[in-house]
Image (cartoon, rainbow, N blue to C red):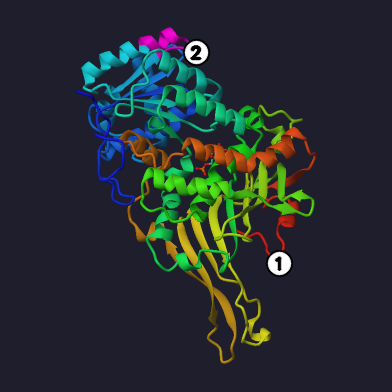
């Protein structure tokens, strides 16, 4: 008999739209890099919340794998603190039974014998906990270990097959197109693509998934969703936090281009711009995303590529003084790392030809906000005298991803006065006020999905490569040619004034 995590990986017929009604089969989740931040802050708290919502079977087991010498009990204590601090449900009685399913395994990531020993340990756990040989391996390590872990899983005979074994890969997936292609080759030598789950945690956010529902479960938007009606699209991911303690990673990654644009913002662009898939299934959705990404390229500005990069200088956030990037702990003060990028992308297809997609993201900006705004074209002919129209604003549809999740539509209305006078007003939908349940965290959704065997919200090999291709001209300009066009902006501001140069035809960045 073959054990199976889901009872089949082909389509997902039991999944109705975006609802999840199933519980995964018993399995062991091994987390490589388990002593790191991600495990204690995100993964274990999310698993605990899933268990509390009865989404996990009682046999579900976690093995933390790392180099340091912890006992099972010590590891559980560390995880307990994480749950107390970061889970949605906070620590409760469930911890006792949940923590009995957490184990620790000490090993090196590049030592094949350790992986063979892990295999034996997993077999022992199978018989103790009834996990039926079902395995998921989660790579939460520094990216340089991804390839050795995969090779060692293969070497130790742990790659299993599509029915019983899954591999989850954290971001960043590669450093550029070539390294992503090489990593895909390593992955595909050991695992079948149907076993592989590449994470972009933005895809786990409720409001990001809602982009698809909003577009494809309503009939009124689709006729407007094209270059006939849309003037341009602005995608903003603004953060107030700085680089925090992650300086070395962030410097090495080269800043916001790799950390945010290549993955999170490009994913938001793909979901906004893709054609309607024929079904809500992993490959049909991902086929459409790949198609639109292949049609996307950085736009041209007067001086070459239409993109601006910058780094934050000293400034103020919420009334507190904050350091410049170069004075943050563990960053290299001489490095030209950009904490802000704004770039214009164009999509060369029938639907979007001529519509700029303007993406911007930065740390230490004035406000934490992620949104997608579609600005519609101006009315073709204004029949009201311009004196009464005053500052007529084009219609704007805003999908607010976080915080204050919701959707708003801006239109013009007549002011209640004797003359014809008008003003822009908003029709607003707020998640918080409409649905009374708190949204699950992105990691809850993603962990559950890969345990269920649903790849829809994970990036496929060709998709991740297409996303790298889009940003390659920027990597070449800023890193290979070392173009010295780094701007600076005050922390707590809306970024460098140079970003406005990307806007032509009277367009302006939204003030949020
Ligand atoms: C991560 C980046 O992927 O996303 C971080 O590495 C960034 O630099 C974070 O802060 C933002 O995620 P969220 O969910 O807080 O918007």
Residue 374, how many percent across, how many down?
A: 55, 62
User: Is residue 65 rendered to the left or right of residue 469?
Assistant: left
Foreground pick, 228 / 72: 228
Q: Quadrant of ligand 1?
A: top right
In the displayed structure, would residue 305 be above or below residue 161? below
Ligand 1 is within 8 Å of the C-beta of the residue at disc 1: no
Report the quarter where the C terminus lies.
Answer: bottom right
Closer to the N terminus: mark 1 or mark 2?
A: 2
Please, what secondary structure does the residue beneath circle 1 have?
A: loop
Looking at the image, can residue 205 be seen?
no
> Which disc is residue 163 wearing?
none
Give the percent coordinates (x, y) of residue 118: 36, 13
What is the quadrant of residue 491 in the picture? Answer: top right
Q: Is residue 499 above or below residue 137?
A: below
Which residue appears farthest toward the top when viewing the image?
Answer: 113
Asked if disc 1 and disc 2 are in contact, CB closer than 8 Å, the reply is no
Q: Label 1 vs label 2: CA separation?
A: 56 Å
Question: Residue 279 or 158: which is nearer the viewer?
Answer: 279
Secondary structure category for the residue under label 2: loop
Q: Give residue 452's position: percent from left, percent from top.
A: 31, 36
Q: On residue 506, which mark appears?
A: 1
Q: Quadrant of residue 55?
A: top left
Magenta region: 106-117
Which residue is label 2 attached to? 110
Instruction: Determine if the magenta segment contains residue 115.
Output: yes
Residue at the image point whose x is 63% and y is 76% from the top:
392
Pick the front one: 12 or 327: 12
| Residue 260 covered by magenta stretch | no
Residue at point 47% right, 25% down?
187
């Amino acid at each position: 008999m073959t054990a199976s995590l889901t009872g089949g990986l082909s389509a997902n017929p039991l999944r109705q739209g975006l609802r999840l009604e199933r519980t995964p089969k018993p399995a062991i989740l091994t987390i490589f890099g388990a002593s790191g931040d991600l495990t204690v802050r995100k993964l274990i708290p999310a698993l605990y919340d899933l268990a509390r919502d009865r989404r996990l079977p009682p046999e579900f087991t976690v093995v933390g794998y790392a180099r340091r010498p912890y006992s099972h009990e010590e590891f559980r204590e560390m995880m307990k603190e994480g749950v107390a601090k970061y889970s949605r449900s906070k620590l409760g009685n469930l911890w006792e039974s949940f923590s009995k399913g957490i184990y620790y395994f000490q090993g090196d990531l590049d030592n094949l014998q350790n992986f063979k020993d892990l295999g034996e340990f997993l077999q022992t756990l199978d018989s103790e906990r009834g996990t039926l040989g079902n395995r998921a391996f989660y790579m939460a390590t520094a990216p340089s270990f991804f390839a050795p872990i995969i090779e060692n899983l293969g070497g130790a005979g742990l790659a299993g097959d599509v029915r019983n074994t899954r591999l989850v890969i954290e971001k960043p997936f590669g450093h550029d197109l070539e390294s992503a292609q090489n990593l895909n080759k390593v992955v595909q030598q050991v695992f079948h693509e149907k076993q592989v789950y590449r994470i972009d945690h933005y895809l786990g956010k409720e409001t990001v998934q809602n982009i698809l529902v909003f577009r494809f479960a309503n009939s009124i938007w689709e006729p407007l969703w094209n270059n006939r009606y849309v003037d341009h699209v602005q995608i903003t991911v603004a953060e107030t936090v700085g680089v925090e303690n992650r300086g070395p990673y962030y410097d090495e990654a080269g800043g916001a281009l790799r950390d945010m644009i290549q993955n999170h913002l490009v994913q938001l662009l793909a979901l906004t711009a893709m054609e309607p898939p024929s079904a809500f299934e992993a490959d049909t959705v991902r086929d459409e995303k790949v198609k639109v990404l292949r049609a996307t390229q950085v736009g041209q500005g007067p001086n070459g590529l239409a993109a601006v990069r910058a780094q934050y200088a000293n400034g103020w956030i919420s009334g507190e003084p904050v350091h410049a990037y170069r004075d943050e702990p563990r960053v290299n003060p001489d490095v030209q790392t950009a904490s802000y990028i704004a770039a214009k992308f164009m999509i060369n297809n029938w639907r979007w030809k001529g519509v700029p997609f303007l993406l911007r993201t930065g740390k230490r900006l004035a406000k934490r906000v992620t949104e997608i705004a579609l600005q519609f074209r101006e009315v073709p002919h204004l029949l009201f005298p311009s004196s009464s129209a005053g500052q007529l604003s084009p219609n704007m549809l805003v999908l607010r991803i976080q915080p204050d999740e919701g959707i708003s539509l801006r239109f013009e209305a007549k002011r209640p006065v004797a003359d014809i006078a008008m003003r822009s007003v908003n029709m607003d939908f707020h998640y918080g006020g409409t649905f009374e349940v708190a949204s699950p965290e992105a990691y809850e959704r993603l962990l559950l999905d890969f345990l269920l065997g649903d790849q829809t919200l994970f990036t496929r090999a060709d998709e991740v490569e297409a996303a790298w291709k889009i940003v390659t001209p920027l990597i070449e300009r800023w890193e290979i040619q070392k173009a010295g066009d780094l701007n600076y902006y005050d922390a707590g501001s809306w970024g460098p004034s140079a970003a406005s140069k990307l806007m032509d035809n009277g367009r302006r960045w939204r003030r949020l």
